[in-house]
Image (spheres, grey):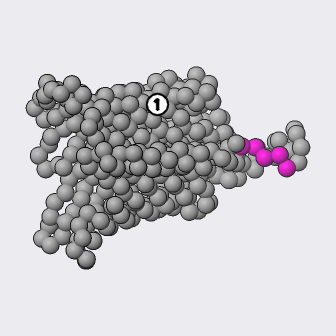
Amino acid sequence: MKGLRPLIVAIAGSAAIFATATQSNAAADWQEFQFQYVYGTEYAELGQSINPEDGYARDNTTKASTFTIEYNNGWTYGETYLLVDMNLENDSNEVWFYTQGWEYFSLNKIFDTEVFEMGPIMDLRVAPGWQLQSSHDYYAGDYAQSLLDEAAWPGMTPVNDSNDLLELFYGLNLALDVTGFDFMGLTFGVYDDFNSRTDFDNQLFVSLYYRSTFDVGPTSWKVEGFFNVSGDRDSNVSSTLDQQANLFSKHQIVMDLGKLIWDKSNEFYFGTEIRWTQNTYGIKDVYDGYGYITKEQNEFFPTLLVEWVF
């Protein structure tokens, strides 16, 4: 079943994007479909951070490619956002998927009022969401293997279990009007874990996202990204799974290369995505007396980004 999980996550996310795009094509006030390719070399919290000999965490980094399908639209009573990431770890050829979706129900539109407009706040929106992610169990090390060989049978492979992400989000969103930005928004609420193998407490979550477009001489640019802040949370299964508060953010700076080369704007972009994290994914230092089973990491590095907009 575990081998099917990445495929299930990818199919679920892609199907959601396709169904939403198809059904809303006629009804949407506006819509945008993007495909992105990102390549980076300094990822710290991936498989190569595990020592294959002893199974313990280390500080090595690895290279990875990410292929992203992204869709969003505006419709009669709000906005829809859907995303699917396929991540390929280049050093080990491991593949995993992440997908998330949001629905923003506008209280101004639903109740045909302007009462929720205050200063820079354009709208208050109910914001349910979800996120799924596949994961891989990983080899616990030659030392653990030798212990099992003695206690069990030759060839038995010990693993450190990884757990899939299966969560629903309950919260609110503020649509903001800020000078210099095409859009900006603030989402806040809690994530509810539905994976019985982790059984996390609810997690507080705040996200600030933005986009700005501007011209510099003959060139056009787009800057967009987000800051996600997640609170700490405990697992009711094992304290080794407990997560600490963390920051996860990405910021893209891209030039409209299509407009510059073949005079077609908002079609093909090239630039960089800067990844900045603190306590990546909330992972804590966990020491078992011999070494670190997990090890917290901070990341700040640029990646290569290519984007197509349809």
Residue lying at 39% horizontally and 52% vertically, measured from the top left:
70
Nearest the viewer among 61 and 287 is: 61
Region of the chain picked out in magenta, as a range: 155-159
Image quadrant where one finds the N terminus: top right
Residue beneath disc 1: 168
Q: Is residue 284 above or below residue 55?
A: above
Residue 48 locus on image (x, y percent): 58, 55
Write down the quadrant of residue 289 in the picture.
top right
Secondary structure, mark 1, is strand
Residue 115 locus on image (x, y percent): 14, 24
Residue lying at 83% horizontally and 41% vertically, measured from the top left:
148
Nearest the viewer among 269 and 59 is: 269
Residue lying at 62% horizontally and 60% vertically, measured from the top left:
92
Please indicate, yes or no, whether residue 187 appears anywhere in the rendered image. no
Q: Amino acid at mark 1?
A: Leu
Residue 308 locus on image (x, y percent): 35, 63
Nearest the viewer among 164 and 161 is: 164
